[in-house]
Amino acid sequence: MRPMTIGLLVVLMLSLLAGWWFQNFESVEQTRWVGYSGEASYNQFYAAEALLREQGIESDSQATLTPASWLPATSDTIVVASSASLSTPTQINELLGWVFSGGHLVVLPPMDDSDSDWLRDAFGMAFVELEDPEFAEDTSADADGEDDSPDADVDYLLQLGSTRYRIELTDAADATLSDDEGVVIARRGVQDGVITLVGSEYYFANGQLNEDDHARLLLDIVAGYYDSGMVWFIYSADFDSLFEMLWDNFPRAVSLFLLLLLAWILSSLPRFGPPLADSPPERRSVTEHVRAAGLFDWRSGRAEGLARSAIDALLHDAEYRHPGIGRLSPEKQAKRLAAITGMSADSVLQALMLRDEDNPRQFTQHMKTLQTTRDRL
């Protein structure tokens, strides 16, 4: 079966399937939650930025943090999750130098499989994941804090059900916030800077910031006990793939494309049965090639060469059949050829003489005379 026949059958089948589909189904509107739009769709700290701006605190965000190539001023605050990108010695040393020089680093739990050994080695604090799987059933609870500030109110209502990590301390911290499972938040001054560990990244996320005391906790961390400059949020966005975006926005177009792709693959498969014989190539006659070459010479202004070739061919045949003609003058050649062929001596002489002023009609007549004379030898 030919590929074109297979393709037509597939198109017919798809057309019937599409007709049945639109006959039995119709588009309906649905109201469903599709997530945040704009920057909030990929920046989980967008609401936190807006809150700080309303409070008169400058804030901004970035997708990633690479300390070796960029770090803000040492008067600023960075809010970032512990990740593999901060586990190389070069990145860690750059970040530690920034903290020791006066920066405020707020570290959230790791978003991947990276460990927090560098935090333990540098600051004596590290994240420890809870082993009890029942903790996720908790909804919210009070967390009590210990702080050196005399007038600080450190009782917070937090969503502890989403707090999978607690903080392990090797030495006493300047301030901590704890529950029955352990330390939830810890802060410690190191040389000229400050390091703060927070047990959950969801406290400051868009959907959780307005819950319980999460907004108050954010303000206390970045501005309550630390006179900071600008606050930088590193949101570590994980963007959807191109196919997921196309499927979410154009599912019908994607389905049609996949069906057409399948049909093309099927049509490209090896054919069944004996192959059809190819038609023989079209071959042109020698006369047609000669005619085309002469026409090309005439249009290219090379008619003299074409006429000289015809004259040489005539004299060659005449010499072969009647020796001695080639040594005669043109006038005697014309008379001798006219006597042999019965042609007019004047017309044969005019054909043998080359003249550039001949018009196309005269040139054609001379060529015809040469060919007729040659045929009558």
Image: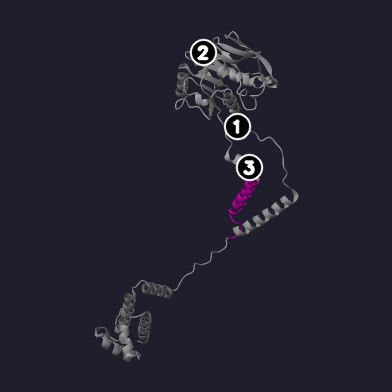
Left or right: where 298 falls relative to 33: left
The mark that comes first in sequence, 3 or 2, is 2
Viewport quadrant of the N terminus: bottom right
- 2 or 1: tag closer to the N-terminus: 1
Residue 23 visible somewhere in the drawing: yes
On residue 40, which mark appears?
1
According to the picture, the residue beneath numbered tag 2 turns out to be 189
Q: Residues within 10 Å of mark 3 (few under 14, many from 20)?
A: few
The image shows residue 10, relative to residue 296, as above or below, that is: above
Q: What range is drawn magenta here?
A: 252-274
Residue 21: percent from left, percent from top: 72, 50
Q: Is residue 319 left or right of residue 131?
A: left
The residue closer to the viewer here, 58 or 94, is 58
Circle 3 residue: 249
Quadrant of residue 155 within the rendered picture: top right
Evaluate whether residue 320 shows in this view: no
Inter-mark Cα distance, 3 to 1: 18 Å
- Percent of width and height locating residue 324: 26, 86
Residue 332 image-quadrant placement: bottom left
